[in-house]
Image (tube, rainbow, N blue to C red):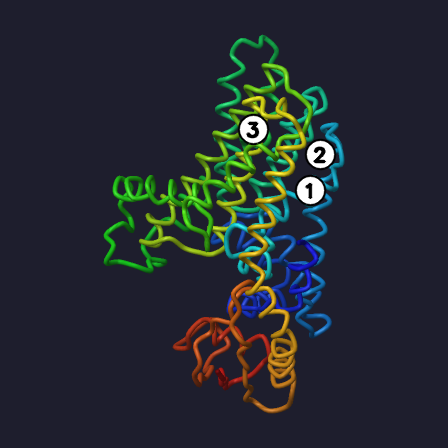
Amino acid sequence: MLAAYAALLPAGKWQGDDYLAAWFVGARGWRILLDRIGGWSPRPLAEILSCLYFAASDALDRPLIAPFLAFLWAGVLGTVALAARAAGLRAPLGLAALWFALALLPARPGEMFYWPMGAVAYLPCWAGLAAATALHLGDARRRGAALAAALAAAALSAEIGALTALLYAVLAAAAATSDRSMRPRLRLLLPALCGAAVCLAVLRGRMQGMGEVMDRASGLAGDWPASIRAAAPAFAREAAGIEGLPLAAGIAVKLAVLAGLPPDARLDPPARRLAAVWAVALLIGAGASVALAFHQFGTLCCGRHAALRQGMVLLALAALGAAFGFAALPAAPRRIGLAVALAALLAVRAAPLAAEWRALPAVAEARWRTWGSGLGPGEAMTLTLAPPGGVTNADSLPPGTYARSTDQPFGDTPWYAWGVMARFGKQRLTIAP
């Protein structure tokens, strides 16, 4: 399964954000890192990785999409495997590969797994959450600093990771009231502070104003009570179902995951209680993502958010399975049920995967036409859109002809077109369908 999806890494695409970010890094250097962390994007870990990527891309004048995505995928797998090993779980690399495959399959993975600007935030966030899940399924005596590091990484990668880490720190501290030792609470101080800092930065910055509303007619944007009321049924449907499957089939798959994902080791009562607390934090965090989307955009946005929520739901099922003692059930039926569920999901995804494998040459040709035009002589360039796909991210810039009249963002030019022209030092742009 991983090979089937990894073969599409070269089909990942830059979108308007990537061209603009590449120009900012080239023009302002590391100053842009501080500007973004202190303003629009309080995601220190994601922003550092992003700056390193675009600095390398600018230096080589190449998009480096497949190598960068491969680096992120390998880093995620390695992080989860190391956490599973630290927890004393059996076959840690196999566990990491299984969870990664499950994160790819339930929702459209394009923005979270194939778009560099999306992947740089959401993959490390999921890796931190998955590592924390693995640590909850193993020997509690080995958890310690590793859990704090995993939660802090999730918090410093994306806002939903920050909220989840903060929720867990509060819930776990409350659940440990009978423990006279302060050590469990002190270990959670770092992720709690990271989560609180990111959440406060988002509340004071990006969530002020109505500049990102996509659907004003819904009446949800800016209205907290209405957004929360709308989020409850929307998240319930999303958490129970799987895109492309009937609701009953999605529920059956997730029941198989609930029973099949927990490792064979049985947890003692305190560890089971903490695993349940972690599952609750994951589910509340994912549900809060829906309410926040309604409040910020007036509608659900975007593919990367949906993919991360599905990944969080599946991690919560793994934690709940351990908390409810499903690991005590016979291993063979659990594994067979999980294998059947995975095979069914892959069968549903087989046609889109095959179509995108066949489209790989056309995607590569469109990319190199764009970069050849951008790096060529003259003041004009053409951006050639790649064929749309059902698995990887879309080339979603609107076709048209644009001009750049100023070197200061953005003037009277749409931001995405200005970013493309600025990245290549051009004055005129044609986006060709």
Q: Is residue 16 above or below residue 137?
A: below
Q: Is residue 347 left or right of residue 200?
A: right
Q: Residue at x 51, y 30 (%)?
A: 279
Image quadrant occupied by the N terminus: bottom right
Give how far apart the Cα atoms at labels 1 and 2 are. 8 Å
Q: Secondary structure at mark 3?
A: helix
Q: Is residue 45 visible?
A: no
Q: Secondary structure at mark 1?
A: helix
Q: Are marks 1 and 2 in contact (CB under 8 Å)?
A: yes
Q: Residue at x 69, y 68 (%)?
A: 64
Q: Nearer the viewer, residue 198 or 395?
A: 395
Q: Nearer the viewer, residue 271 or 179?
A: 271
**First in residue order: circle 1 vs circle 2:** 2
Q: Nearer the viewer, residue 243 or 206?
A: 243
Q: Amino acid at mark 2?
A: Ala
Q: Nearer the viewer, residue 7 or 176?
A: 7
Q: Amino acid at mark 3?
A: Gly
Give how far apart the Cα atoms at labels 3 and 1 are. 17 Å
Front tag of 3 and 1: 3
Badge 3 density bin: few <14, some 14–19, many ≥20, Cα 10 Å: many
From the image, tell me which residue sits under label 1: 96
**First in residue order: circle 2 vs circle 3:** 2
Horizontal and vertical percent for residue 225? 26, 39
